[in-house]
Image: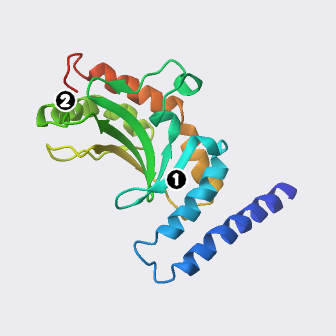
Amino acid sequence: MVKAYFEALQDELDRAVIAPAIEADSDLGYRGYSWWYAYYSCLRQHLGNIDDWDIYSGTRNPVMCWKPSWNRDERHERGASNKCSTGMFFLELNYSSLLLKFAWQEKMGTATNVTSLRQALQTCSGELNRYGFRVCLRGSEANRYTALAKLEINVEQPLDVVSQAIRNFLPDGFNAIVRQLLACLPRTGDA
């Protein structure tokens, strides 16, 4: 009973942070970014190590990036690489989607490289599905940062449920998927 009380209290504290952002954006302003920043801030605290997450504005969207996938240093490396000759894999929250993305080196997002990446995703689709991701790479051209697969997050669930789902994937699920993708990509200069 005490545990339930403290969980309910934490939910109320989270609402106290998020609710003012909703009120400030009552007309949801320009895409309601304030709400998402408040939500990400609370979620980041529920995830534990808040230093592992950066919250910022993307070009057209609010973003919360998992820094260990972006800045692979020895502390987060754990024997896994997220890079290949044409770019690197990383993970971010974008609105309510947890996205596995690829950052291309300049001018590397050619149709041939995108096709190779798509084939690698098809080969790894079982592992992606195991974690609830679905492939979302479309077209033959690549943006600088290309979304490959996404997992929809239900923002109406309590933050402890959402954070647990993300923690269940990190870091082992991310590392397993990236290792499998890297193994499927050509070893030459193509992705």
In this figure, what is the number of numbered marks? 2
Q: Looking at the picture, which amino acid does disc 2 mark?
A: Ser
Residue 125 versus residue 173: which sits nearer the camera?
173
**Outermost residue, bottom side:** 27
Mark toward the start of the polypeptide (2 vs 1): 1
Residue drawn at 25 percent across, 44 percent down? 137
Marks 2/1: CA–CA distance = 31 Å
Q: Is residue 37 above or below residue 30?
A: above
User: For residue 94, which quarter of the picture?
Assistant: bottom left
133 to the left or right of 170 = left
Residue drawn at point x = 39 percent, y = 32 percent: 127
Q: Residues within 10 Å of mark 2 (few under 14, many from 20)?
A: some
Q: Residue 116: give its label.
A: 2
Q: Position of residue 26 (x, y in %)?
A: 51, 83
Pick the front one: 156 or 73? 73
Q: Quadrant of residue 128?
A: top left
Q: Indicate the position of residue 100 as horizontal and vertical percent values.
A: 38, 41
Q: Position of residue 14 (x, y in %)?
A: 68, 64
- Asked which quadrant contains residue 179, the reply is top left
Amino acid type of the residue tagged 1 in the rendering = Ile
Q: Is residue 153 left or right of residue 139?
A: right
Q: Quadrant of the N terminus?
A: bottom right
| Residue at the spot 19% in from the left edge and 29% down from the top edge | 116
- In front: label 2 or label 1: 1
Q: Secondary structure at mark 1?
A: strand
Q: Residue furthest right?
A: 2
Looking at this view, name the residue that lies furthest to the front: 106
Q: Which residue is mark 1?
A: 55
